[in-house]
Amino acid sequence: MTGQTIARRPNQLFRNLNAKIASIPMILTAVVIFLGGTLWTVVYSFTNSKLLPRLSFVGFDQYERLWAATRWTVSITNLAIYGVLTLIFSLVIGFVLAALMDQKIRFENTFRTIFLYPFALSFIVTGLVWQWVLNPEFGIQSVVRSLGWTSFTFDPLYNADIVIYGILIAGLWQGTGLVMCLMLAGLRGIDGEIWKAARVDGIPTWKTYLFIVIPMMRAVFVTTLVIIASGIVRVYDLVVAQTSGGPGIASEVPAKYVYDYMFQAQNLGQGFAASTMMLVTVAIIIVPWAYLEFGGKKRG
Amino acid sequence: MANPGSLAITVAGADAVRDELSGPRGRRPQRSFSGRNIMIYGTLLIAALYYLLPLYVMVVTSLKGMPEIRLGNIFSPPVEITFEPWAKAWASACTGLNCDGLSRGFWNSVRITIPSTVISIAIASINGYALANWRFKGSEVFFTILIVGAFIPYQVMIYPIVIVLREMGIYGTLTGLVIVHTIFGMPILTLLFRNYFVSLPEELFKAARIDGAGFWTIYLKIMLPMSLPIFVVAMILQITGIWNDFLFGVVFTRPEYYPMTVQLNNIVNSVQGVKEYNVNMAATILTGAVPLFVYFVSGRLFVRGIAAGAVKG
């Protein structure tokens, strides 16, 4: 520690200045929009804001009103049905397709192109196409009837009890290709020696998949699950395009509730409360995952 | 707090997709009509039918006249091919009082997508480079907030952004929407670029430093030329994502600036007038054409892009 090191050090703030300048957009986005915006919405969800945001707190009133509203409970029920079925079906279909694609088949590229192309399309396009295919007057129902089965009924978009399944069909059409791709990558990542060992031991193929391969693909499944789940909570465009929430309010979803209350019903407080509930839903999915994925590793 | 680097498993997954999808391995399959093969190909063909059917129906419907649609079924090929629905969808379909077709929405989408893609990639690549090679105190904290923020539903942040844009006087304009797209593209793009730059050999960076190159010189002269593939992936991701966006378009723009998806929805789901299914389907294809084109041209890079972008939801 000689006197030389005292030679003036540049101000801490100006060290690495260019990198800091380059990071300004990121810092603003992270702090102002993501952190600040979220906090702002949560705080204002406890106010009775109507047309304009006002800071007059009313406690949990908005949440009580929210959970008392039929439209909200319908939205949440729909989201739960749609979510659970989407998770199950897209994982099963995605995995089965990937397993079939992994059998050293011919035309693999063609099949993959076909399975994945809907993912390039927007939910609006997806919703409108399936609205047309499921149209009872001209679509599948009328075609089957014209073949002679005159009592055939399949009109999910006009039947309040099953409308959510009509949306599910469209959602699966759009999204399973991606799941298939992720699963296929997972399957290809499994060591060929595992397969050889299983064959030597005389284990049937389906048992190898179920008890050896799938447990080995745990990480792929978890990632896929999180990707699908965080997409499900946001489902909005698909419903708007396919049914506009109808018939009646039978196919409403939370994201649409938020939009309608914020920008159409001029009831901001309700919109904020509903969006905060969406945030809570996501947190319920993400936090345990983040804890399992990263919490353990850090200590280890 | 979690280490943001390990949050990047999805992108690692995307790399795996690229490597593993480079074609089937092992010997060619034997040609045989064994029961096993019939089952495999049978299932795949049925699945392929389910995926192709809507596209087929869309194209077929758009080429028929309305009388033929009312008579026939949606799967029958057109007896008399007409391109009139396409012309009408493009140039004269009505939304409310405007009757200039989807073309306006198309050009709006172009005017939204191009600047949003360029600006978001420019900012995110420089940012990812700074995070990879020029870390400063707190940079990882901000990055972690950014990545965690990617999982927050957009609905939670929309209204505060409306207020900010209104204060800036750009709410409802294309500029405002471009800013919004840049903001929400930032988490995934920054992650993508950061991980890519981290994977480049560090010696390269050090050698350039010793030669006296600074922040911007290294970025422009060394990093940029070496990372063209990742720029292409980012472009695919942004072009398809922004083109397909509906929510931001409807929230942050005025009707005259509505992007194509919003206008399409307004045309098809408008309650007035007689429903012209052929025009609707032509309009739907037109809106889907741009991302489909990107998809078919980019091939495997698309898979890599969406696998990385899937985090976005």
Image (cartoon, grey):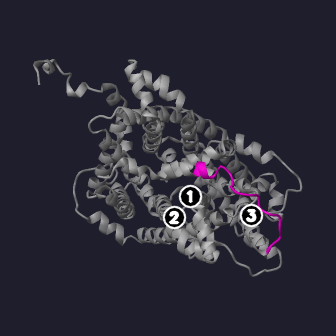
Asked if the residue at tag 3 contacts the one at tag 1, i.e. Cβ–Cβ closer than 8 Å, the answer is no
Label 3 Cα neighbours within 10 Å, binned few <14 / some 14-19 / many ≥20 = some
Disc ID at residue A217? 2
Q: Which residue is mark 3?
A: B49
Label 2 marks a residue whose chain is A
Q: Are marks 1 and 3 on the same chain?
A: no
Q: Looking at the picture, which amino acid does disc 1 mark?
A: Gly
Of the residues under marks 2 and 1, which one precedes in the sequence? Answer: 1
**Direction front: furthest residue:** A200
Asked if the residue at tag 1 contacts the one at tag 2, i.e. Cβ–Cβ closer than 8 Å, the answer is yes
Foreground disc of the pair 3, 2: 2
Disc ID at residue A287? none
Q: In this image, A261 relative to A172: left or right?
A: left
Q: Is residue A249 above or below residue B124?
A: below
Q: Looking at the picture, which amino acid does disc 2 mark?
A: Met
Element at label 2: loop
The segment highlighted magenta reads: B17-34
Foreground disc of the pair 1, 3: 1
Magenta stretch contains residue B20:
yes
**In this rendering, does residue A209 appear at all?**
yes
Please tell me which residue lies in front, A297 or A222: A297
Q: Looking at the picture, which amino acid does disc 3 mark?
A: Leu
Q: CA distance from mark 2 to mark 1?
A: 9 Å
Q: Residue at x 26, y 50 (%)?
A: A54
Asked if the residue at tag 2 contacts the one at tag 3, i.e. Cβ–Cβ closer than 8 Å, the answer is no
Tell me residue A121's x, y (percent): 63, 51
